[in-house]
Image: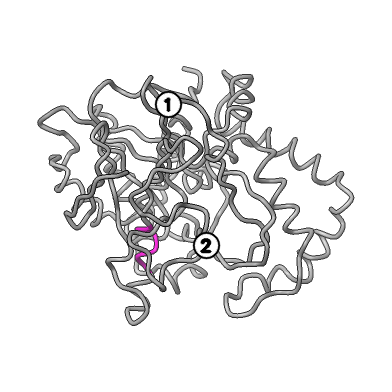
């Protein structure tokens, strides 16, 4: 069957779960508080929907992905792909993926170990299965995407129907690379990468200015439609900041301020904080509303359900600075619009 980048949600009540990032124990606790059996079946016929980023950084990405595959095969769960799943498909080792890529294991161990590694003989089957998962899920009253619902980029995917996801991604990247390498600033980008790129991974020291690298990141966020949907589009940052393992010169755009459709959209990706504190992770300050339970966007019908469980490694490594309660795995119940957390707490949204 040809790849279907958009698929249909069932007409049942849903529990939409934010980015898990390999925190399998937190997921099991949340599953219990939501009333599901261990295999993902709900006695009242509810269904689980995941907004992507099931893997990377946490202690047991293999178990989380294996659980989802089993639940999906029984019709109990669906997902949209996140940027971390796409990195596996594109064979692109990134921060936190040392459980899968040998080339990242030593570099990532300082922050994320101990963790379970993916069995070598199961990697090909896992990526083949992930490559069949959609980028968008929808029904008349709801839309789900990992990072950004962008109609102009969705139109480009419509034109690529019938082409496999991985083939699409690499073709879009090749077109993007041709455009970038023809840009007048590309030589400056190459110089910055040769002389400063290694310095950009030191969180304790800001590297020299890298304006061409920022321009490169800006273009990459916008030219590949698949990347735009699962990572969001970016703008130039006012000042460099450290996130995702390196210093960055671009920051994410609040695309929801230009979203005027009637249909609500549920997303993950943006590292929201529940009851933000001075120690909250800084990367998304000012992007989402300060009220943790608030919908956002031009019509207040977009909700980010990622409450930063992917940062739990910080509480394990730096208990004096971070408390485990800062990092939560969260489900948004639909149509109730109620939040349920892995510690059993509940809260309405507004």
Residue at left offset 55%, top offset 40%: 257
Count of number-bearing discs: 2
Q: Is residue 304 above or below residue 271?
A: above
Q: Is residue 256 left or right of residue 233?
A: left
Which label lies toward us, 2 or 1? 1
**Magenta residues, start to end:** 308-313
Helix or strand or loop: what does disc 1 sit on?
loop
**Residue designated by label 2:** 283
Residue 88, position as x, y percentages in the image? 50, 46
From the image, which quarter does the C terminus lie in?
Answer: top left
Q: Is residue 310 above or below residue 229?
A: below
Is disc 2 surrounded by few (<14), some (14 to 19) or many (20+) residues within 10 Å? some
Residue 48, position as x, y percentages in the image? 26, 35
- Nearest the viewer among 173 and 149 is 149
Q: Is residue 13 above or below residue 343?
A: above
Residue at left offset 22%, top offset 54%: 342
CA distance separating discs 2 and 1: 28 Å
Residue 272, position as x, y percentages in the image? 41, 55
Indicate which disc residue 61 carries: none
Q: Is residue 59 above or below residue 338?
A: below
Q: Is residue 54 magenta?
A: no
**Residue designated by label 1:** 263
Rendered image quadrant of residue 168: top right
Residue 53, position as x, y percentages in the image? 42, 47
Q: Is residue 310 magenta?
A: yes
Magenta highlight: main SS = helix
Residue at left offset 14%, top offset 47%: 32
Q: How is the image coloured?
A: one colour
């Amino acid at each position: 069957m040809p790849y279907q980048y958009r698929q249909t949600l069932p007409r049942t009540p849903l529990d939409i779960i934010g980015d898990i990032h390999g925190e399998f124990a937190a997921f099991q606790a949340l599953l219990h508080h939501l009333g599901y059996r261990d295999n993902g079946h709900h006695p009242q016929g509810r269904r689980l929907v995941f907004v992507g980023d099931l893997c990377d950084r946490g202690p047991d990405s293999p178990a989380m992905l294996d659980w989802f595959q089993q639940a999906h095969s029984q019709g109990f769960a669906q997902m949209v792909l996140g940027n971390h799943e796409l990195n596996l498909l594109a064979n692109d080792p990134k921060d936190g993926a040392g459980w899968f890529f040998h080339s990242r294991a030593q570099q990532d161990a300082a922050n994320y170990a101990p963790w379970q590694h993916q069995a070598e003989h199961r990697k090909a089957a896992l990526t083949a299965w992930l490559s069949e998962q959609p980028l968008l899920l929808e029904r008349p009253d709801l839309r789900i995407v990992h990072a950004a619902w962008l109609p102009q980029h969705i139109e480009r995917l419509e034109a690529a129907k019938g082409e496999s996801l991985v083939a699409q991604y690499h073709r879009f990247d090749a077109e993007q690379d041709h455009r970038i390498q023809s840009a007048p600033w590309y030589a400056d980008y190459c110089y910055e990468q040769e002389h400063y790129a290694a310095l950009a991974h030191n969180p304790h020291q800001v590297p020299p200015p890298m304006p061409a690298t920022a321009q490169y990141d800006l273009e990459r966020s916008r030219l590949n439609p698949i990347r735009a949907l699962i990572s969001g589009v970016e703008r130039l940052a006012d000042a460099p900041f450290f996130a995702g393992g390196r210093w960055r010169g671009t920051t994410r755009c609040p695309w929801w301020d230009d979203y005027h459709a009637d249909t609500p959209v549920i997303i993950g990706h943006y590292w929201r904080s529940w009851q933000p504190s001075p120690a909250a992770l800084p990367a998304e300050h000012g992007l989402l509303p300060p009220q943790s339970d608030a919908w956002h966007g031009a019509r207040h019908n977009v909700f980010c359900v990622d409450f930063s469980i992917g940062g739990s490694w910080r509480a394990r490594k730096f208990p004096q600075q971070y408390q485990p309660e800062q990092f939560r795995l969260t489900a948004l119940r639909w149509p109730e619009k109620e939040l349920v957390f892995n510690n059993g707490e509940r809260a309405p949204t507004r």
